Amino acid sequence: MFRNSLFGRLTKDLKNIRFSFYKGEVGMEYPFFKAHRVWTKGQFQPLFIRILGGILGLLFLAIFSLGCSNEKSSKPVSAPIPITVGMSIQKTVPMELRAIGNVQAYSTVTVKSKVGGELVRVHFAEGQDVRKGALLFTIDPRPYEAALKLTEARLESNLAQVQQAKANLERDLARAKNAEDDARRYEFLIERGVVARQQYEKMRADADALEATVRADRAAIENAEAAVSADRAAIENAKIQLGYCLIRSSIDGRTGSLLIQQGSIVKAEDVNLVVINQIIPIEVAFSVPEQFLPEIKKYMASGKLQFEALAPMNEERPDKGIVTFIDNAVDSSTGTIRLKGTFANRERKLWPGQFVNVVLTLTREPNTIVVPSQAIQTGQEGQYVFVVKQDLTVESRPVVVGRSVNSETVVQKGLRANEKVVTDGQLRLYPGARVEIKTSDSANATQKKTP
């Protein structure tokens, strides 16, 4: 702008130059780059003026061009680019598989009544922890107590019949023995011709009749004893039915919502009363791609395979468990294999039905180079990082990356340990750029928290 204004002023001044000659009456005007002339005597004068004007114009253009080039060359050197850096670290890195898991109760019991009647009492509050054998419900026991007493009375009656049958047997045994002796005597006498055959036959018939009576007495005893056994079984059943009136917990666990209220009439094996979940310990089910199955089986064969469950909003303190189950078939619809693991869950951070982030650790690889994940950049030729050199300039270095673990990425090739890599500010960088290392906000926050 300065050059254009000055050149315009010069042009204006040259237009106003009036050349007068000592000889001659006619004056002539010669503008710059445009000659308006009136030919008179001495025609060599316009040619001289035109040459002079061109020389002056070229001179001024050279001066202004030199001034502009000096102004441009005097610009200051660009300032260093601010960046944040991280270090490449060599350490042992776990080989992990990540999946979404679902928490399941270790065992679940649905409580029903095995007898019908009125629900006269509920002995727990909803959501209460109960121990195995704890009393939960009471069904009206009076009808079952009466049935038990009736069965016990029938037993007493049948026991008396057994005793009577045994007494009859002893009586008939004595009579049968006496009749048999009489029959033998008359048999001896009839051989001697002392008594009539009619008397002998009568004695023989009496002995046989008494023998049949003895057999009948023995059958009566067996029948009475069978009735006694049936009564005893009925008593046992009545006691069991009476015991079902007191419904107890079969596991240690936590009760859910009460599904039927006190005072309701229930039928045997009809409605659910409450559901109890065992949450200490607890299980987590998850699925992983089938291609990892050989590795999982390999490491499970060499020892217990551990994994972590990270509950939402509480990922700083994950629970640790052990894989205890591998399904017997791959899900062909998803190409995954289902696994289960058991957690102690003493702090009850895991809850049935909850979704968690599962981290399955297969093994640990020592001497692995890792960098912060944000240091990895992707370009047309692949992935690379900016490495800060000793003279505070950067170089672009291609790398071969592996898996990511938390906020770090494994670098398989391209970096050594303890090299500085740029983690923020890469957009302004180019190979050889000068940089200024700034402390990141997270580092500042950490320093402020450190006493």
Image (tube, grey):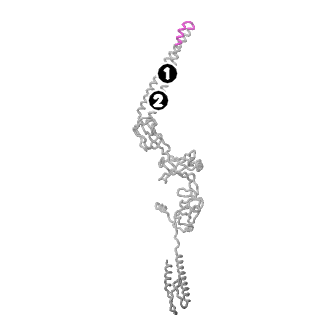
* Residue under the point 43% across and 30% down: 147
Alpha carbon separation for disc pair 1 and 2: 21 Å
Magenta segment, prevailing SS (helix, strand or loop): helix
271 or 404: nearer the eye?
A: 271
Is residue 194 inside the magenta stretch?
Answer: yes
Q: Decide if residue 451 is in sight here.
A: no
Locate residue 315, reporting x and y percent: 49, 53
> Where is 41 relative to 440, above or below?
below
Helix, strand or loop under label 2: helix
The disc labelled 1 sits on which kind of residue? Ala
User: Which label sits on residue 322?
Assistant: none
Residue 365 occupies quadrant: bottom right
The disc labelled 2 sits on which kind of residue? Ala
Helix, strand or loop under label 1: helix
| Mark found first going from the N terminus, 1 or 2 | 1
Q: Decide if residue 238 is in sight here.
A: yes
Is residue 139 inside the magenta stretch?
Answer: no
Q: Residue most toward the bottom?
A: 23
- Pointers 1 and 2 in contact (CB under 8 A)? no
**In this image, 44 relative to 246: left or right?**
right
> Where is 100 relative to 132, above or below?
below
Q: Residues within 10 Å of mark 2 (few under 14, many from 20)?
A: some
Locate residue 387, reporting x and y percent: 56, 64
Q: Residue most toward the front?
A: 39
Residue that mark 2 sits on = 234
Residue that mark 1 sits on = 220
Q: Which residues are magenta?
A: 190-205
